[in-house]
Amino acid sequence: MGKSKKNEGFDPHNLSAQDQLKFEIAQELGLDAKVMEGGWRSLTAKESGKIGGLITKRKRELKKEALQQE
């Protein structure tokens, strides 16, 4: 059976690169305390969408910078 995410606690020191970026953006939006307390599932759809949109924007910027440096 699949791994249950319900019982996993949130550990900001043990994150993948993708999750680090997601948490950085959550901090910028002032949502870090909410995530620390209740995990990612505690966010509303609007908050999650805002984070997702900013992740996409930041990845595009990083890709554009990388291409300009070549």
Image: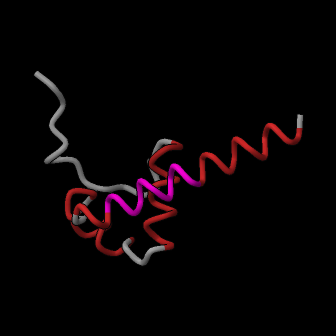
At horizontal 56% and vertical 54% (from top left) the residue drawn is 57
Magenta stretch encompasses residue 33: no
Residue 31 horizontal/vertical position (percent): 37, 73
**In this rendering, is residue 38 above or below 58?**
below
Rendering quarter of residue 51: bottom left
* In this rendering, position of residue 66 left or right of residue 51: right
At horizontal 63% and vertical 46% (from top left) the residue drawn is 60
**In this rendering, is residue 70 above or below 33?**
above
Quadrant in the picture for the N terminus: top left
**In this rendering, is residue 43 above or below 8?**
below
Rendering quarter of residue 2: top left
* Count of numbered circles on the image: 0
Q: Which residues are magenta?
A: 48-57
Residue 32 horizontal/vertical position (percent): 39, 71
Q: Nearer the viewer, residue 37 or 63?
A: 63
Q: Main secondary structure of the magenta part?
A: helix
Rendering quarter of residue 53: bottom left
* In this rendering, position of residue 55 left or right of residue 9: right
Residue 27 horizontal/vertical position (percent): 47, 71
Q: Residue furthest right?
A: 70
**In this rendering, is residue 36 above or below 8?**
below
